[in-house]
Amino acid sequence: MAELAALEDPKARAVNEKHGDDHGVNLGKLRAVAKRLKTQQELSRELWETDDTAARLLAILISHPKAYGRDELDTMVREARAPKVHDWLVNYVVKKNPHAEELRVAWSADPNPAVASAGWALTSERVVKKPAGLDLAGLLDVIETEMKDAPDRLQWAMNMCLAQIGIEHPEYRGRALGIGEELEVLKDYPTSPGCTSPYAPVWINEMVRRQG
């Protein structure tokens, strides 16, 4: 904890806090600490228990994703206050855990929007990598009905799922584009030069163009 405190940078904190992340540690330096520590599951759990955002990010990096039980991950995703902690937990741990599919189903319908967004992130992963068995038309129905009024984090996750369906599955592309154009979610999102807009119709068309 002392080492993480020594890495604190007020400028980094100011930038991170704009995104809801209450820490000021450069992520490159944090990854260097993790590389030195290597995988240490017990230390990872102790760091998580501090409730400190930088410590939790480090905990994720040095954890063994398959060592967590289903209920433990469910508790952790509900405790993950900072968006970056939530994002890393889902992408670096839950996606690699044997309980990922069970949690995807449970979380997607959770009344807590942050938890539901984790479920949708896992669904997007399946849309790309293991679409067999998914009801893509049903997912588009839910997105069409609920995405427009969803809280920000959940809306972002549903929008990603919409875009991935459109990009990866040509038979649903027309409908995905139509839903994106109708709802106009993230249409005016500020996008840096050289980056692709998260607005689904632009995103889908650009990625399909690159594939072609």
Image (spheres, rainbow, N blue to C red):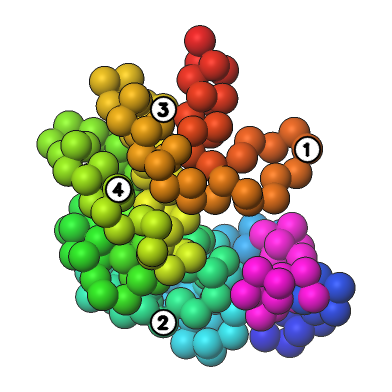
Seen in the image, is 88 located left or right of residue 158? right
Residue at x 77% of width, y 76% of height:
13
The circle drawn on residue 79 is 2
Residue bearing mark 1: 193
Helix, strand or loop under label 1: loop
Magenta stretch, residue numbers: 14-31
Q: Nearer the viewer, residue 59 or 181?
A: 181
State which tag comes first along the sequence, 3 or 2: 2
Q: Residues within 10 Å of mark 3 (few under 14, many from 20)?
A: many
Q: Residues within 10 Å of mark 4 (few under 14, many from 20)?
A: some
The circle drawn on residue 208 is none
Please say whether residue 193 is one of the residues in the magenta stretch. Answer: no
Residue bearing mark 3: 167
Residue 58 picture location, percent across and down: 59, 70
Helix, strand or loop under label 3: helix
Image: 31 above or below 75: above
Foreground tag (1 vs 2)? 1
